[in-house]
Image (cartoon, grey):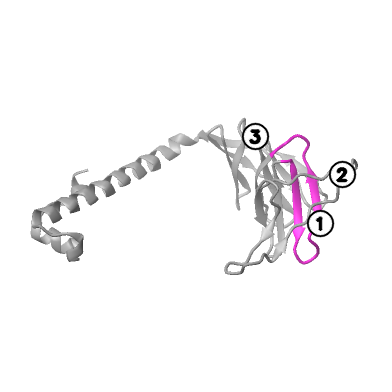
Amino acid sequence: GEENDLKIWKIGEKEPLFTAKNLPHDWLQLRRSVWVTDLAFLTQDVVAVCSRHGYVRLYDSRAQRRPVCNVDFEAKAATCITRGFDERQVYVGFGRGQLHQVDLRRGKPDKGYKGAVGAITNIALHTDGLLVSTSLDRHIRVHALHSKDLLYKCVLPVMTYGSETWSLTMGLIRRLRVTQRAMERAMLGVSLRDQIRNVEIRRRTRVTDIAQRV
């Protein structure tokens, strides 16, 4: 987060296993700002992070606390990062829709994937050589990993409407069932303190489950 640099924790322990150290001051002797927005484990000990201040840093917890590689993107706020198919590459999304491959061996951006006009929100790779991304312009895009060609795009609401409707319907059904069980207990003159199972209450009242009518 903002002014909260990378820390690696082991679940159940109070102290972090690794705490990152910032780069030295710049040529004006000014402190470099920190704002980590996402991270990706390349191996158990090697982690890449991206920042709203436009840098990608690579940390090796076995070597040192400071980054072993730093790649700067001028005037670009990074929003998300994912690893490539090997530990030499990462893919980084930015706030204005840019999407780049970063070669960590050379310490500089390698490729750019065009098409998005909103901030990149997520990136995923497929073993068939595809790069999938989503952005705030409500599109999902599929690029060819090596040629960078845009192969497919569609508006996300077309895909998510069904799942959103399903969630709303299931929430309504849960509320109706709670109300129905309360009415059935009132019919029998029992309360929760009587600890009678819902199955037994349903057997006595012979009421049809309201979910079957929704």
Residue 173 appears anywhere in the view: yes
Q: Are marks 1 and 2 in contact (CB under 8 Å)?
A: no
Most common secondary structure along the magenta stretch: loop
Q: Position of residue 171 (x, y in %)?
A: 32, 46
Left or right of residue 103, residue 141 in this image:
left
Q: Position of residue 113 (x, y in %)?
A: 68, 37
The residue under the point 64% across, 64% down is 9
User: Circle 2 sits in a helix, a strand or a loop, which is it?
Assistant: loop
Mark 1 lies on residue:
68
Image quadrant holding the C terminus, namely: top left
Q: Nearer the viewer, mark 1 or mark 2?
A: 2
Mark 3 lies on residue:
97
What is the distance, in whole Å, between disc 1 and disc 3 at their CAs? Answer: 27 Å
Above or below, 168 relative to 89: above
- Name which residue type carries label 2: Asp
Mark 2 lies on residue:
26
